[in-house]
Image (tube, rainbow, N blue to C red):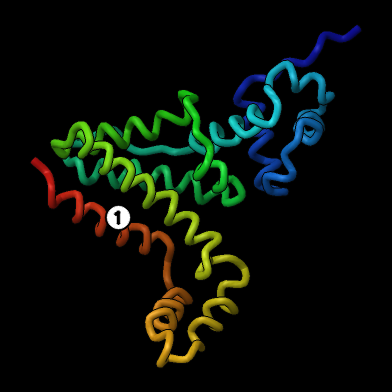
Amino acid sequence: MPAPRKFTRERLQAAALALVDAAGLDGLTMRSLATELGTGPMTIYNYVDGRDGLERLVTEAVLAEAAWPEPSDDWRADVHAVAEGMWRAVRAHPHAIPLILTRRSLDLTTLRPAEALVQALARSGRSGADLLVAFRTVSAFVTGFAQAELVGPLSRDKDVTETTGRIAALPRDQFAGLAEIATAAEASDPEAEFAAGMRIVLHGLQGKTR
């Protein structure tokens, strides 16, 4: 009788994320993961604790891709770098965004970017409640920006031209603001938008340093 196959955590994460990228969260099941790995569903139960375990694999895999340089002597640059690293990881896997937004996790892999962001913000002189508010604000910008870019009404999906075109054509006497930003969205660059948004956030953070 052949020995049972063994899988590393990293192999399981990669396979789970590949399924979500290809078919969305509905495509991630014990059976589909087993098929992806070339084994039987019962083998997967040796590694994964039901649906919760499957979702942990995905969030771990996404946030493990976040990368940023070593800390510098400029806390603003460090906050921007960590936030950008998180944003790039999240936006690379749009189907996983609902999990990133809603799933609480204490996995070390998912906590690593959060700790780096907290440490960068702490170098601005914040602590306690001030540090918490700053962390929540930057984290919300990262995930919210990714969500708005990929699944919002002005998202940059395959139908973006049609969607923004319809919004841009709204009556100007009633929706002048939406029409203006829809026109801008048609030619906008996501990276330039993110950088500009982070400058706004950092400008606000700069206003209360000690």
Residue at x-position 61% and y-position 22%: 9
- Please state which amino acid type lies under the numbered disc 1: Met
Residue 186 as seen in the image, left or right of residue 27? left
Residue at x-position 25% and y-position 57%: 199
Residue 30, percent from left and from top: 77, 31
**Circle count:** 1
Q: Quadrant of residue 192?
A: bottom left
Above-or-below relation of 12 to 198: above
Residue 63, percent from left and from top: 49, 36
Q: Quadrant of the C terminus?
A: top left
Residue at x-position 56% and y-position 83%: 166
Q: Residues within 10 Å of mark 1 (few under 14, many from 20)?
A: many
Which of 111/132 is in front?
Answer: 132
Above-or-below relation of 119 to 182: above
Q: Quadrant of the N terminus?
A: top right
Q: Quadrant of residue 203?
A: bottom left
Residue 78, percent from left and from top: 26, 41
Give the farthest residue toward the right: 1
Residue 35 as seen in the image, left or right of residue 93? right
Q: Secondary structure at mark 1?
A: helix
Residue 160, percent from left and from top: 56, 72
Which of 74/47 is in front?
Answer: 47
Above-or-below relation of 40 to 29: above
The residue wearing badge 1 is: 198
* Residue 73 visible here: no
* Residue 17 visible here: yes
Above-or-below relation of 117 to 76: above
